Image (spheres, rainbow, N blue to C red):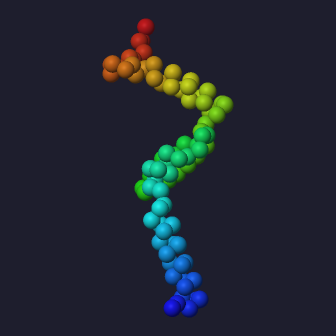
């Protein structure tokens, strides 16, 4: 029969092992992020940040329009004319 101290140590070891056994993968953690957070896995670590809102979203849209208009989807580059 185990004494109380040994029993507690054994319980702690088993509990710790079970916690590690059921830890979700990085991809599962990424998929489980709450609404309003974006994330990416870099060098084996999950990095999260809030989604851009308001002025940041508008700036991104305007930059996409300005820069994207020079690079059409068919791959041909449109250069400004000298006229």
Is residue 2 toward the left or the right of residue 75 in the image? right
Q: Position of residue 76 (x, y in %)?
A: 33, 19
**Image point (64%, 34%), residue name:** 53
Number of numbered discs on residues: 0
Q: Nearer the viewer, residue 35 or 10?
A: 10
Q: Nearer the viewer, residue 41 or 15?
A: 15
Q: Position of residue 65 (x, y in %)?
A: 51, 21
Q: Position of residue 10 (x, y in %)?
A: 51, 82
Q: Is residue 41 visible?
A: no
Q: Position of residue 45 (x, y in %)?
A: 47, 56
From the image, which quarter does the C terminus lie in?
top left
**Image point (61%, 27%), residue name:** 58
**Image point (47%, 62%), residue name:** 22
**Image point (58%, 89%), residue name:** 5
When asked about the image quadrant of residue 60, the answer is top right
- Using the image, determine if residue 55 lies above or below residue 37: above
Residue furthest out toward the right: 54
Is residue 79 toward the left or the right of residue 37 in the image? left
- Using the image, determine if residue 58 lies above or below residue 27: above
- Using the image, determine if residue 64 lies above or below residue 10: above
- Using the image, determine if residue 20 lies above or below residue 49: below
Q: Is residue 2 visible?
A: yes
Residue furthest out toward the left: 75
Q: Nearer the viewer, residue 78 or 57?
A: 57
């Amino acid at each position: 029969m185990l004494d109380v101290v040994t029993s507690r140590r054994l319980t702690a070891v088993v509990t710790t092992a079970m916690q590690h056994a059921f830890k979700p993968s990085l991809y599962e953690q990424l998929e489980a992020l709450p609404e309003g957070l974006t994330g990416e896995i870099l060098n084996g670590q999950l990095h999260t940040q809030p989604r851009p809102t308001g002025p940041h979203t508008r700036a991104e849209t305007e930059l996409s329009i300005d820069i994207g208009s020079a690079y059409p989807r068919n791959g041909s580059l449109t250069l400004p004319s000298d006229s």
